[in-house]
């Protein structure tokens, strides 16, 4: 299919989505592909654009639904702060679900990133961040048990490791984050209620203490369309 017909397909889909009430299901994939005169594979490619914008959501076994206008979390990445802190500062309402705190042992990847021995005891914290009762981010933090243990967690703990460490008074200095696009694996897709393989924004970060130790190794997955991150950059040589 040439670029022009594909753009026309996206325009037709945009018009359909715009005229479908929020929460209503779109026609099934076979019916919609037939209606628009394209293959199901081409339809999926075109629909992915609207998924990444947060305009539609696919639910396994249920179909594709139109999403109403959503809140967008807009913030800079120059200063590290939790999603809860950022949302509160911006006046946005978010909630946390699927909170999981468990003891695990370091595999090769986590051992390397935390500078620990393979098999070292760790604490893993996983949670889903929601807005308008829709999952928009899946966050995973892994720390050595001598940095944070279950007994150290406050009674009202809702998953923010960063806020817990800050409130405890830990000497945190910098965080290094690698930012990339990725495809959702089965665990992440299930948590975010999306399809496996859907495109996500991924941040892999290491949080350092004053003596250079990696305290927290985290991986965060964000559904594009619900987040607008930006970086203020200084002009070179000035």
Image: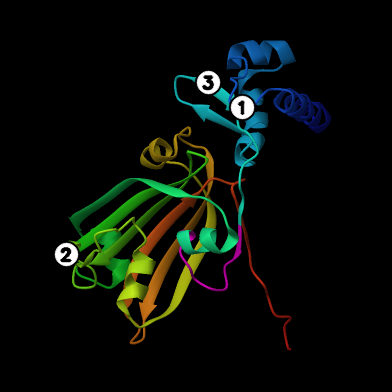
Res 37 seen here: no
- Residue at x 68%, y 10% (from the top left corner): 34
Q: Which numbered tag is attached to residue 177?
A: none
Q: Earlier in the sequence, mark 3 or mark 1?
A: 1
Q: CA distance from mark 1 to mark 2?
A: 47 Å
Foreground residue, 64 or 166? 166
Q: Tell me where residue 164 sits by quadrant.
A: bottom left
Pointer 3 local density, CA inside 10 Å: few below 14, some 14–19, many at least 20? few
Which element is circle 3 on? strand
Q: Secondary structure at mark 2?
A: helix
* Residue 168 location (% of width, % of height): 30, 76
- The residue that label 2 is drawn on is 151
Mark 3–mark 2 Cα distance, whole angstroms, equals 43 Å
Q: Earlier in the sequence, mark 1 or mark 2?
A: 1
213 on left or right of 138: left
**Taking 107 as reference, is 47 above or below it?**
above
- Mark 3 and mark 2 lie on one chain; the one further toward the N terminus is 3
Q: Residue furthest right?
A: 4
Q: Nearer the viewer, residue 101 or 183?
A: 101
The crowd level at tag 2 (other Cα within 10 Å; few <14, some 14-19, many 20+) is few
Point out the image quarter for the N terminus.
top right
Question: Horizontal placement of 119 versus 187: left or right?
Answer: left
**Residue highlighted by disc 1:** 44
- Residue 123 percent location from the top left of the image: 23, 60
The magenta stretch is 74-83
Q: Residue at x 60, y 21 (%)?
A: 24
| Marker disc for residue 63 | 3
Does 116 appear above or below 20? below
3 vs 1, front mark: 3
């Amino acid at each position: 299919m040439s670029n022009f017909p594909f753009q026309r397909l996206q325009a037709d889909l945009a018009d359909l989505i715009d005229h479908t009430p929020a929460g209503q299901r779109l026609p099934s994939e076979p019916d919609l592909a037939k209606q628009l005169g394209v293959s199901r594979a081409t339809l999926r490619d075109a629909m992915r654009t609207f998924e990444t914008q947060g305009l539609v959501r696919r639910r396994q076994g249920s179909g594709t639904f139109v999403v109403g206008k959503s809140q967008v979390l807009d913030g800079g990445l120059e200063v590290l702060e939790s999603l809860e802190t950022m949302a509160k500062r911006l006046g946005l309402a978010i909630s946390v679900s699927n909170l999981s705190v468990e003891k695990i042992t370091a595999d090769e990847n986590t051992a390397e990133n935390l500078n620990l021995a393979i098999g070292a005891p760790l604490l893993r914290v996983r949670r889903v961040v929601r807005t308008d009762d829709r999952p928009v981010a899946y966050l995973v933090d892994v720390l050595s048990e001598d940095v944070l243990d279950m007994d150290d967690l406050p009674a009202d703990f809702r998953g923010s490791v960063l806020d817990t460490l800050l409130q405890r008074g830990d000497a945190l200095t910098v965080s290094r984050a690698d930012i990339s696009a990725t495809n959702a694996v089965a665990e992440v897709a299930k948590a975010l209620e999306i399809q496996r393989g859907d495109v996500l924004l991924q941040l892999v970060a290491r949080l350092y203490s004053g003596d250079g130790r990696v305290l927290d190794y985290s991986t965060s997955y964000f559904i594009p369309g619900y987040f607008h991150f930006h970086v203020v950059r200084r002009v070179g040589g000035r």
